[in-house]
Amino acid sequence: MAVTVEYDVVVAGAGAAGMTGALAAARNGLSTVVIEKAAVFGGSAARSGAGIWVPNNEVVLAAGVPDTPAQADTYLAAVVGAEVPAVRRQAFLANGPAAISFVLTWTPLRFQWMGGYPDYYPELSGGMPNGRSIEPAAFDANILGDEYANLNPAYIPTPAGTVIYDVDYKWLALIARHPKGLATATDIVWRYLQLAAQGQNPITMGQALAGGLRAGLIAADVPVWLNTPLTELIVENGRVAGVLATRDGQQLEIRARRGVLIGSGGFEHNLAMRQQYQAAPIGVDWTVGAASNTGDGIRAGQEAGAALGLMDDSWWGPMIPLPDGPYFCLSERTLPGNVFVDGTGKRFVNEAAPYSDVVHVMYAGAHFPCWMIHDQQYRNRYLFQEIAPALPYPASWYANGALVSDWTIEGLAAKIGVPPAALRATVDRFNTLAKAGKDTDFKRGDSAYDAYFADPTNTPSPCLSALSLPPYYAFKIVPGDLGTKGGLVTDARARVLRPDGTVIPGLYAAGNASAAVMGHSYAGAGSTIGPAMTFGYTAGLEMAAST
């Protein structure tokens, strides 16, 4: 027999969307509970770099970023297109700055501008070549007390004794090439020593964001019940009146007087759903989203009559399937001296383009298999994942098939199963373009975004360098993701809609459980988390205003 409890608001999911929404509801006077399927809180946000794309927020304006509502609207309209209703897009832009200010008011979090990190299409009208994204400043994990042990670990933990921000990785990759690389390596240790001397346990990026939001909930007396999966929505007379969940082996009926917010993430770890909605090749092994994201909230909403949208899409990114898990290939494919080829041995994409675009091109042209080719000069110059320049790659990478090498281009081609003559022609053509400093084939380097993770010491182009020093290497590239971006269709007020466009009373959604306000595109660093927090906040306010 189910145990019945009652709150004003029930939030499913303790990620950025859910925790922001719960905090907004609680600070507006509503009794609120958060239920979380996993044994840890933070979701995919805790695993991430925690960039936040919210134009015109107080942090970027204080930093002197010349942003305006009109610029942001023009830019986002160009990026998203007609896929997303203008009213919803504009609601994100209108409410986002207030959401950031709210979090600054009611949590220990502080944010800083990711200066220099461009919007992903900075040449579009309203785009910002120096960016408008923010990230958390270092957060003292001691504030969480024993709850810190329940924080979902980072996708790639930062080295002990360092304080690393998103904007540091650009320079750390260039530690053997640029004076700022070594300076940054020194800074990340010095920051830690300064904070540790004050008795702090500093954490950054997604760990800081999730930890700070959780601290806000603790201060607001909002319980977060871990190991409590949502099983079903309670629908009475067409209205969502609560949820059924399981906790400690006991079925719970949690009544919600004002509403239920679904913030339970996407469906990236649900193979059946991915195969149903998304194109092949697809699976659950190439995602870095939280392991608990199996679409539970999306399916519960659909069973309650909700419409679904963007289910074919994800927050894509080229991944290397390393033996300890997929590796999100960001700076590595942007640094000069590498080229992507498909099974024909031919180049097919601007390797330095926004990561979602690269995978969209892979799927559109069926460019599978895909390999990233580079030479020994590239290996000598740049940090790769956590492997210092010039050092050999781990033997395990070769053993699991993620990496192949050979002393000749033709030998490499034979090992990866592409026509040797085609790969030779591709490399020769790329080398010609690199020596000229202009990629007339795929325009690599034409956008300010392409150059962000490139090498300013390389000439004549920071984005292009010839492959000429053996041995040569080939990394397997697969269509990975940060999470799925399809889910429950919502309106400008985060209310979940039926297929006929009517509202399902009492039901709200935000984050990757909802169809993304970015549509099929990606405006800039933090285009997942920024809208997640904004629409979570919006949902909290809506439930507070409802009767």
Image (spheres, rainbow, N blue to C red):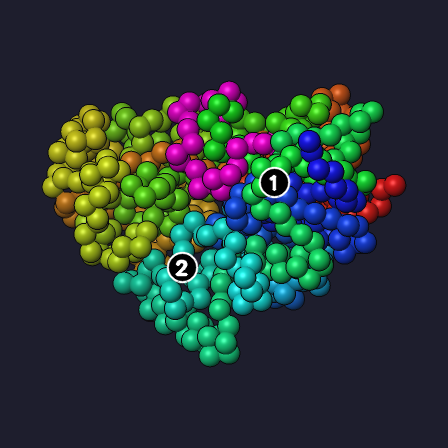
Which residue was labeled with disc 1? Answer: 247
Q: Taking the image as drawn, is residue 232 in sight?
A: yes
Q: Under tag 2, what secondary structure? A: loop
Q: Residue furthest front?
A: 1
Residue in view at x 30 percent, y 52 percent: 384
Give the residues in magenta: 274-298
Residue in view at x 66 percent, y 25 percent: 302
Left or right: where 39 falls relative to 401: right
Please tell me whether residue 60 belongs to the stretch shown in magenta.
Answer: no
> For mark 1, does the 10 Å Cα neighbourhood hold few (<14), some (14 to 19), or many (20 or more) residues?
some
Residue 83 is labelled as none
Residue in view at x 39 percent, y 25 percent: 281
Rendering coords of residue 285 (x, y %): 39, 34
Q: Nearer the viewer, residue 191 or 124?
A: 191
> Of discs 2 and 1, which sits in the foreground?
1
> For mark 2, does the 10 Å Cα neighbourhood hold few (<14), some (14 to 19), or many (20 or more) residues?
some
Residue in view at x 57 percent, y 54 percent: 210
Mark before the other along the chain sequence, 2 or 1: 2
Which residue was labeled with disc 2? Answer: 158
